[in-house]
Amino acid sequence: MSSTESPRVPAVSATVAPEPGSVRVAEGERLGSVSLPGLTLTVRSRPGTREGLPPALYVHGLGGSSQNWSALMPLLEDVVDGEAIDLPGFGDSPPPDDGNYSVTGHARAVIRYLDAAGRGPVHLIGNSLGGAIATRVAAVRPDLVRTLTLVSPALPEIRVQRTAVPTALLAVPGIASLFTRLTKEWTPEQRVRGVMALCYGDPNKVSPEGFRAAVEEMERRVQLPYFWDAMARSARGVVNAYTLGGQHGLWRQAERVLAPTLLVYGGRDQLVSYRMAARAARAFRSSRLLTLPDAGHVAMMEYPETVATAMRELLADAESAAAEAAEGAAGAGDVQDVRDVSASAGDADGTSGRGAEAASGTA
């Protein structure tokens, strides 16, 4: 068993639509809380428009939350039954009891949730850190993943962009507390503008309503006593994952992914280099690539319609391939059944199936 895997959890303790407090919930979304041993996750769900739709799980990036998927989820609600989680220590999820914010720790949380909820296999979608997490999940637990969609996945780069260095520096012990002291006078509006300038290809495209919502969320988060600790430890987890080699290396695990994969890269991404798109397309064995020259790091928020269209094509093709495979397997079963009947008839005559064939061949 991989170190990312965990024993199956028999039950999920959940409250449906709990009091969300100041956490923003879009129309059509529900907010729930799932309790597992040592772990509590907030789950934002957007049920499919009809019964029986396949499940999807969305995983956000460093410093993000399940709200990062609120623009994309309604565009896919007629093809999937969607859920987005707040990773431990982010959004409205409290820190994990063991304080493990590594990529493996986050991946284990996703696996434990899927095992406990019994929703797998899912269409798994991840952005940035969430992309690295989703890659690891798909590699070590292929039974849980139908398709994989990665938006600017945080996979190791030898030459990191200079614009990504400040984020990586959060991994250095003491930097987060220093940054907190240096920026304690910053207003939530200033913090949000800084984040948007880093993550969006064109921050001016953010609507006034979207900006106000981001400011409200920033105001809430910076008051959490564990906010910077979760950021720093998760950043350290990404850096550590970049240095892992062997079977636990993220690129090696990308090569092990069996699920059909959609890769989305932005030409103006300041955190994950656009040049990594070609390498990713080679690494994932069954992949397709969507490049958006004007997008930044969060294409699912900047160009949700375009990402949704590409995902629809991925899901439709995967469904067709699965149906063809099932039909082929059924056909093979029919042939086997005929052979079994023939063998039985031969045995009834006192001759084995192979002996009957041999006799026929020599007649």
Image: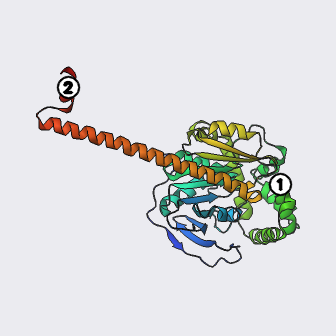
Residue 327 visible at all: yes
Residue type of the residue flagged with mark 1: Leu
Q: Nearer the viewer, residue 38 or 325?
A: 325
The dot on residue 360 is 2
Q: Quadrant of residue 227?
A: bottom right
Asked if the residue at tag 2 contacts the one at tag 1, i.e. Cβ–Cβ closer than 8 Å, the answer is no
Q: Is residue 254 above or below residue 196?
A: above
Q: Residue furthest left?
A: 350
The 10 Å Cα crowd at callout 1, few under 14, some 14 to 19, many 20 or more, is many
Q: Residue furthest front?
A: 363
Q: Is residue 268 above or below residue 226?
A: above
Residue 310 shown left or right of residue 184 in the figure: left
The dot on residue 129 is none
Which colour scheme appears in the figure? rainbow
The dot on residue 198 is 1
Residue sitting at x 38%, y 46%: 330
**Earlier sequence position, callout 1 versus callout 2:** 1
Residue sitting at x 79%, y 59%: 177
- The image shows residue 352 at horizontal and vertical percentages of 17, 32
- The image shows residue 93 at horizontal and vertical percentages of 64, 67
Total marks in image: 2
Residue 62 visible at all: no
Residue type of the residue flagged with mark 2: Ser
Q: Quadrant of residue 276?
A: top right
Query: From the viewer's perspective, is the residue at label 1 or at label 2 nearer?
Result: 2
Q: Is residue 192 above or below residue 105?
A: below
The 10 Å Cα crowd at callout 2, few under 14, some 14 to 19, many 20 or more, is few
Q: Nearer the viewer, residue 132 or 186?
A: 132
> What kind of element bears circle 1?
helix
- The image shows residue 357 at horizontal and vertical percentages of 21, 28
Q: Nearer the viewer, residue 198 or 3?
A: 198
